[in-house]
Amino acid sequence: TLLSLLLRYYSADGENGEGTIEICGEPIAGIDNERFRNEVGLVPQDPFILAASARENIDMGRGLPFERIEAAARAAHAHDFIAALENGYDTSLGEGGSRLSSGQKQLIAIARALAGEPRILLLDEATSRIDSATEQIVQQALEEVRGRVTIIAIAHRLSTIRDADRIVVLNHGRITESGPHEALMEIEGGLYQRLYLLQQLTRDGLQAND
């Protein structure tokens, strides 16, 4: 629901017309479609991969120069595995990305979004279906672009947002807690604290079993 509002799939006005979402003080409802597409990049939970080359999957018909495609792939930490394919960036990724792991698909999706040079990058549960090792690669890639892109991440796996400047906790559609990780962990019995500790215990238990 929140992502749908951010992507303008429906209006935030509400019944009384009091709701609004703004970018740098400008209501997103007033931004024309082409400019909005250029300024907002999306990395979905299940990225769609074309039965086309790595280059084409990052470009997505935008006619971008190869230098920009490669730079985006490097920023997303996707360059190394793409370069290792038999034909590099011209290698077909297979129907639905059948030649890629779940983590590699996400890195392609991040490269695709970054290639558009957006001001805002939206992540919708982008690391929920990848292993811990690939999650760390994704986190490193995002950390490296934080200085030039505003990142809004929707996540239930709280380790992925630990380093965020601000974490907003929603419970049944309402904001219950807000602040950096350290501040939220100091709220005794708080929802974020309880969920974070539970996830850490679960993760530690799984690693011990391995």
Image (cartoon, rainbow, N blue to C red):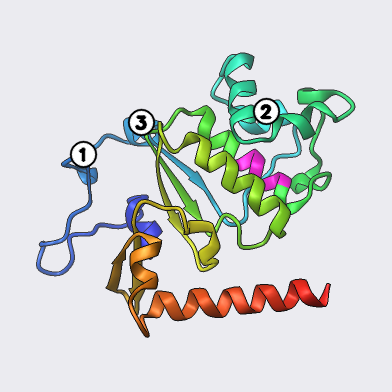
Q: Is residue 134 above or below residue 83?
A: below
Q: Is residue 94 left or right of residue 159?
A: right
Residue depicted at x 49% and y 63%? 155
Q: Nearer the viewer, mark 1 or mark 3?
A: 1
Q: CA distance from mark 1 to mark 2?
A: 32 Å
For label 1, the residue is 24
Instruction: Quadrant for residue 57, please give it.
Output: top right
Q: Which residue is mark 2?
A: 56
Assess whether residue 106 is covered by the magenta stretch: yes
Q: How far separated are the C-alphas under marks 3 and 2?
A: 21 Å
What amino acid type is highlighted by mark number 3?
Glu
Residue 7 image label: none
Quadrant placement of the N terminus = bottom left
Q: Name the residue tied to disc 3.
A: 34
**Percent position of residue 34, x then y:** 35, 31
Q: Which of disc 2 and disc 3 is earlier in sequence?
A: 3
Say which label, 1 or 2, has the lower sequence index. Answer: 1
Other-residue count near label 2 (Cα within 10 Å), few / some / many at <14 / 14–19 / ≥20: many
* Segment colored magenta: 104-109
Q: Assign the magenta stretch its main secondary structure.
A: helix
Q: Is residue 73 above or below residue 43?
A: above
Residue 134 in the image: state x and y as whole percent: 70, 51
Q: Is residue 16 magenta?
A: no
